[in-house]
Image (tube, grey):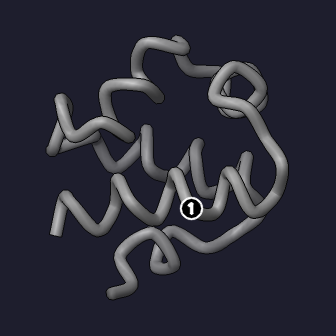
Amino acid sequence: MANNISKNIRRIRQEKGMSQDRLSKKADLALNTIVKIETGENPNPTAETLKKIAKALDISVGDLFKE
């Protein structure tokens, strides 16, 4: 499941033409946090982190878990 989250964040971010840096600023998270989640280095981001990312991408948290 963590792999899906990583792939979905990267895919949706890229579809929206957003850089990792822009997403990190919009989500009020460290750039390193976004990079680690997308690369799978952090396979278990907190619920709060996922909420911030989803809000910044203008999607629901559930969208991050889709297959």
Q: Is residue 4 left or right of residue 1?
A: right
- Residue at x 58%, y 46% (from the top left corner): 53
- Residue at x 29%, y 68% (from the top left corner): 4
- Residue at x 27%, y 40% (from the top left corner): 45
Q: Amino acid at mark 1?
A: Arg
**Residue 44, percent from left and from top:** 16, 44
- Image quadrant occupied by the C terminus: bottom left
**Residue 50, percent from left and from top:** 44, 49
- 18 over 55 or under it: above or below: above
Q: Residues within 10 Å of mark 1 (few under 14, many from 20)?
A: few
- 60 over 37 or under it: above or below: below
Q: Is residue 1 left or right of residue 52?
A: left
**Residue 25, percent from left and from top:** 74, 20
Which residue carries the number 1 mark?
11
Q: Is residue 25 left or right of residue 50?
A: right
Q: Residue furthest right?
A: 17
Q: How many marks?
A: 1
- Considering depth in this image, is 16 or 26 the residue closer to the camera? 16
**Location of residue 29 (image quadrant):** top right
**Location of residue 42 (image quadrant):** top left
- 26 over 60 or under it: above or below: above
- Considering depth in this image, is 60 or 22 the residue closer to the camera? 22
- Residue at x 34%, y 53% (from the top left corner): 6
Quick one: SS at disc 1?
Answer: helix
- Image quadrant occupied by the N terminus: bottom left
